[in-house]
Amino acid sequence: MGNTIEFPNQEEFYIQKATQCQKEDDLIGAIDWLEKGYIKIKSKQLLDKLWSLLCRSQDWNEIIWLVEEFELKDEKYLSAYLEALIHMNRFKEVEDYLKHSSYIEHSVISNLQLKMMNHKLKIEQEKVHQLQEIGDELQKKDKIFSIEEIHYMTQVLIDSTLPQKEFVIQLFLLHPKTPMFDKAILLDEWLDSGSLNAIQLLWNGEIKILDRKNIFPISKSTLYKEESVLLNELMNHFSMEEAMILTQKWMQDTIRLHPFQEEYITSFEEWMNYFSGREDLMESLFYDDSTFLKQYEDFQIYISQ
């Protein structure tokens, strides 16, 4: 008779697969095999090997998932789990857990609190650096920004809670190459979170000084309409496609014109009658700022006749 071939049991199979991946410097593959094995057979040996690799790779998302999914309660799991939450900026959860936990030693709690403080400080420093970089770029008056750069700057400024952001918003509003739409969004943000009584805005080549007491958020404008309400209103007069384009144009244009909407648009009915008949309606959604303002100058001539 021939030699008997011994097949590894299930646990050994997954360990061998993971070991082979490690030999090939494929840490992700090794973690994947051990994770599959543990999900299937809940072996302590598989869990120990998996946990070791996750901690070594500092795969914070996977550590969080593993502890939560399988309700791992031992202190070694919980302390690494809380550290993972810190690295994912989930500070409130860590603070709540430490406040009510009776499973973790005081020395471990102190260590986690120190790590959380250091991580918060690091994030704060990174955010300050972000604002400094954006501010430096906005002081280059000839700088032309890509759509991605504009989106990035706008989002950082909206998300920021640092006092320096007001200065950077001011630079954005005065830059000759930043789009009207994003200026309007950040003007709204300044109204909500800023502390200065007035701010300057470069508008159509002219610097306007805007007093906080005299301007309102976009949503408080007399011309503001809820998108769904506007679409339903327009569908009473136009096809679905036309109504959707007109809705998009109204929402977009009233933001781009902020805070001077009422200087350009006196009534929605006049606006609808004029723009619904234009052949360039779809194209006008993508006009640059100068062409956009020119169409509203033409609109004003039309309504004055």
Image (cartoon, grey):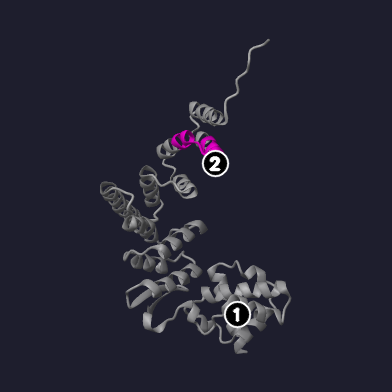
The quadrant of the picture occupied by the N terminus is top right
Task: Work out which residue is located at the far right of the displayed protein and give it.
Answer: 239
Q: Looking at this view, name the residue that lies furthest to the bottom.
A: 305
Query: Is residue 179 a member of the stretch shown in magenta?
Result: no
What's the distance in space between the residues labelled 2 and 1, CA to CA?
Answer: 67 Å
**Percent x, y of residue 76:** 36, 42
- Nearer-the-camera pick, 73 or 266: 73
Q: Is residue 48 magenta?
A: yes
What is the secondary structure assignment of the residue under circle 2?
Answer: helix
Amino acid, disc 2: Ile
Identify whether 106 is placed above or below 287: above
Magenta-drawn segment: 33-50
Q: Is residue 48 left or right of residue 230?
A: left
The kind of residue on which mark 1 rests is Asp
Residue under pointer 2: 39
The residue positioned 44% from the left and 46% from the top of the image is 72
Residue 209 in sight here: yes
Q: Nearer the viewer, residue 232 or 283?
A: 232
Secondary structure type for disc 1: helix
Mark 2 Cα-neighbour bin, 10 Å: few <14, some 14–19, many ≥20:
some
Local packing at callout 1 (Cα closer than 10 Å; few below 14, some 14-19, many 20+) is few
At 62% from the left edge and 79% from the top edge, which residue is drawn?
A: 230
Q: Is residue 3 above or below residue 63?
A: above
The quarter of the picture where the C terminus appears is bottom right
Q: Which badge, 2 or 1, comes first in the chain's sequence?
A: 2
Q: Which residue is mark 1?
A: 298
Nearer the viewer's eye, disc 2 or disc 1? Answer: 2
Question: Residue 213, how many percent across, how many down?
Answer: 37, 83
| Residue 302 visible, this orientation | no
289 to 260, vertically: above or below: above
The image position of residue 36, as x and y in percent, is: 55, 38
Image coords of residue 130 (percent x, y): 37, 56
